[in-house]
Amino acid sequence: MSKGYAEGSALEERLADLERAQHERRAPDVPLRLAVFGSTADEPAPHFLGWADEVDGEELFARGAAYGIKLRRVPAPTRRVTPRRAGAAPR
């Protein structure tokens, strides 16, 4: 006689299906880029100062332009594709 709930191999198979579905829904790996964060006299809360390959955090600190410098890997921005409006010229 049935107990009214899944048990045994049926339950295990259902859990495996759920796990596979969650794995497939995950966002693809996003490329990361090294960013420089820190504080300035004008804005004491830590904020984005620039990309590490474009801004020298040590130099900003040495000349007193920024403090609390930290490097973080953040998702690299990607170019957004916007739908073309009707009648708009191609770019």
Image (spheres, rainbow, N blue to C red):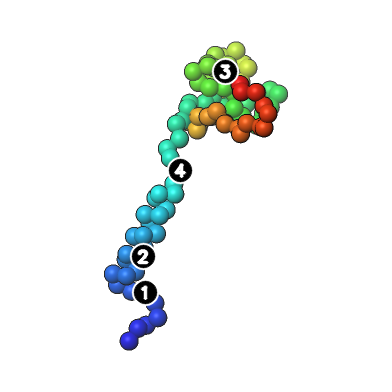
Kind of residue at disc 4: Ala
Distance of label 3 from label 4 (alpha carbons): 36 Å
Q: Of circles 2 and 3, which is in front?
A: 2
Distance of label 2 from label 3 (alpha carbons): 55 Å
Report if the CB atoms under discs 1 and 2 are less than 8 Å apart: yes
Distance of label 2 from label 4 (alpha carbons): 23 Å
- Precedes in sequence: disc 3 or disc 1: 1
Identify the residue position indicated by label 2 in the image.
14
Distance of label 1 from label 4 (alpha carbons): 31 Å
- Precedes in sequence: disc 1 or disc 4: 1
Q: Residue at x 68, y 29 (%)?
A: 87
Under tag 4, what secondary structure? loop
Is 20 on the left or on the right of 81, as rendered? Answer: left
Q: Decide: few, some or many residues near mark 3? Use Cα within 10 Å; few <14, some 14-19, many ≥20.
A: some
Identify the residue position indicated by label 3 in the image.
61
Identify the residue position indicated by label 4 in the image.
27
Res 3 → quadrant: bottom left
- Precedes in sequence: disc 1 or disc 2: 1
